[in-house]
Amino acid sequence: MAVLKVHGGVLSTATQRVLACLHEKQLEYELVRVDMAAGDHKKEPFLSLNPFGQVPAFEDGDLKLFESRAITQYVAHSYPEKGTELIYQDPKRMATIGMWMEVEAHHFDPVASKLVRELIFKPMFGMAVDSALVTEYEAKLSQVLDVYESRLEQNKYLGGDYFSLADLHHLPCMQCLMGTPVKELFYARVHVGAWCNDLLDRPAWNKVIELTNDA
């Protein structure tokens, strides 16, 4: 049995973020599926892993973590010799990567997640889409992507010339939005569109998609 355990649902974007990191690092892990439809993430024993009742939770031996971005950073730091190098020793390079990780968490994800909820998950559960909210958040996402376009004119990836956690963290919400009209906001920007294609074509990410197809 794998030492590393991920507790979550494969349709959860936060869980997907951790799985993408593990596949990039070519690490074996056990996926412990949490039945979120049944509310198991709000009950014990899951609450002993994450008292906030949100997936994913993660175990590496006696270490227990929650919050997907904290988990990916732990994995990248703990297994530097495995798979893709997602973080770097050079402090200036890592500072730039860290800055764009913060941008994803505080500027991209809050907007993209709202759009995913409105355009993907609400219809999935038979709920009405708030069109006014979609319009508002499309405008906000456009502003973020304008900044990304300027950055990606200068560098292949957000953190520089190499793929890193700063890019990986975008993948789950990006993938979801590719199935909606919001996709056009990404591809209206040449460098952002090329960046999307690069990320979405990564073999590690395709392994995550295979898991969601089996859900």
Image (tube, rainbow, N blue to C red):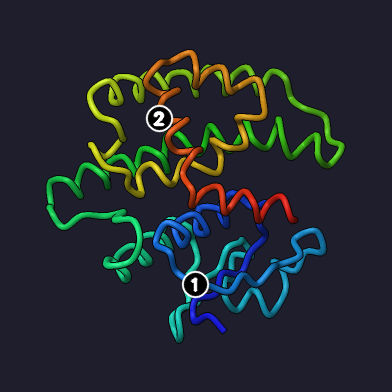
- Please, what secondary structure does the residue beneath circle 1 have? loop
Mark 2 Cα-neighbour bin, 10 Å: few <14, some 14–19, many ≥20: many
The amino acid beneath tag 1 is: Glu
In the displayed structure, would residue 69 be above or below residue 6?
above
Q: Secondary structure at mark 2?
A: helix
Q: Which residue is mark 2?
A: 195
Residue at image point 49% right, 39% down: 201
- Identify which residue is drawn at 48% across, 52% down: 204
Q: Is residue 17 above or below residue 129?
A: below
Q: Nearer the viewer, residue 165 or 39?
A: 165
The residue carrying mark 1 is 28
Picture coordinates of residue 21 (x, y %)?
44, 57
Give the x, y percent position of residue 95.
19, 47
Q: Give the residue at x 16% y 58%.
A: 89
Where is residue 116 drawn, in percent x and y? Answer: 64, 35
User: Which image quarter is the C terminus in?
Assistant: bottom right
